[in-house]
Structure formats: structure tokens, C-alpha cells
Image (spheres, rainbow, N blue to C red):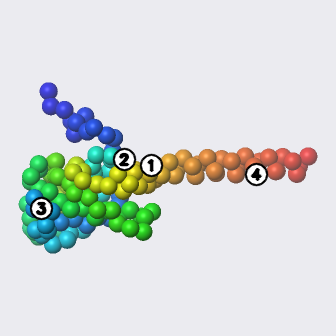
Amino acid sequence: MEKSKQDRRNYIRLGAIFPIEFQLIDDKKKPKSPLLQGFTRNIGKGGMCVEVKSEKGNIPFEIIPKQTRLKLVINIPSSALATNSYVTVRWSQKVSEYIFDTHIFGVEYDEIEADNQRMIERHVLWLHRKPKIILLFSLVLLFFAIFLTYISVR
């Protein structure tokens, strides 16, 4: 029985959108393509899903799972510095549209500094905790307003 992509992952992925830049590299990490831009769709400890839109047929290289190696520059909104990493494409999907092609591919980190990986994880967790914190803060303010109203009426 074939496992789904979710079941094959070693780590959970959380939805997060970061701007990224990437380029094809050779075995010695030398660039083999121009720098391209895209966005993350989700991100986890072991890798991420990347989405790239390009003019029809205008991506300068073929994305081949388990063979394509990329240098990623991840621009985390909470950080002043970009995070560099080297990844291998694990799966790829192309969706053709009228004028644009959308390439979606999953990558696994080959090399990323531990501090940078922790920074990514912290930012993604903050994005998922933020709505709960705002809700809690709103409830505390509402309770405080009700309490002050009750006190002033007495």
C-alpha cells in the first residue's frame, strides 16, 4: 500500500509563506542557473514546499525529483538576514495555466545551519500561536471591560 506524502514525512509541516530565492547548483555547489523567486507553501524541520510561477515554458531548468539540487535563500520576515540552505527536490508537480506555469515542489534540507533552522521553526510556531494569543488578549480585555462596567454600576 502506497503511503501518502503526509505519512512519509519525518516532521510535521506548518503552513507558512516566506519569499525565497533559489538556483540550480552542481555537485560542488556552483550555480548552474539564474536566481529565481518563489514562495514557501508550508515548512517543517526537514524541508518545505515551494511554489513558483513562471511564464509558460520559461523556467530555465527541469525539476527532477531526487536529482535536482538547489541553493535556497529563505527570507524570513522576522529576520534582517536571509537564511541560506542547500536542498534536494523530493517531489515535483507542474500545473499549466493559460499564460503561466505553476511549479510546486517539496524539498528536503541537505545543509542548513542549526541556528537558521531553529529561527525558521520559531517564526513558523509564532505564526501559528499568534491568533491564539490575540484571542486570549481580546478575552482578557473583554473580561476587564465587563468587570469595570459592573464595578461602576454598583
Q: CA distance from mark 1 to mark 4?
A: 30 Å
Q: Write down the residue under mark 4.
A: 145
Relative to 78, residue 42 above or below: above
Q: Write down the residue under mark 3.
A: 28
Earlier sequence position, callout 4 versus callout 2? 2
Q: Are marks 1 and 4 in contact (CB under 8 Å)?
A: no
Q: Are marks 4 and 2 in contact (CB under 8 Å)?
A: no
Q: Please name the amino acid that badge 2 sits on.
A: Leu
Instruction: Answer few, some or many: residues within 10 Å of disc 2's Cα (few below 14, many 20 plus, some between 14 and 19).
Output: some
| Label annotation for residue 14 | 2
Secondary element at image label 1: helix
> Could you say which is closer to the camera, residue 152 or residue 141?
141
> Could you say which is closer to the camera, residue 147 or residue 72?
72
Q: Please name the amino acid that badge 3 sits on.
A: Lys
Q: Which residue lies at the image location 36% right of the left edge and 56% below the top edge? A: 116
Tell me which corner region of the image, top left, top right, bottom left or bottom right, holds residue 54: bottom left
Secondary element at image label 2: strand
Residue 107 at least partly seen: no
Q: Residue 92's spot in the image, x, y percent?
A: 15, 51
Q: Please name the amino acid that badge 4 sits on.
A: Ala
The N terminus: image quadrant? top left
Left or right, residue 110 beside residue 143? left
Q: Which residue lies at the image location 70% right of the left edge and 51% below the top edge? A: 141
Secondary element at image label 3: loop
Q: Write down the residue under mark 1.
A: 125
Mark 1 or 4: the one toward you: 1
Q: CA distance from mark 2 to mark 3?
A: 31 Å
Mark 2 or 3: the one toward you: 3
Earlier sequence position, callout 2 versus callout 3? 2
Earlier sequence position, callout 1 versus callout 4? 1
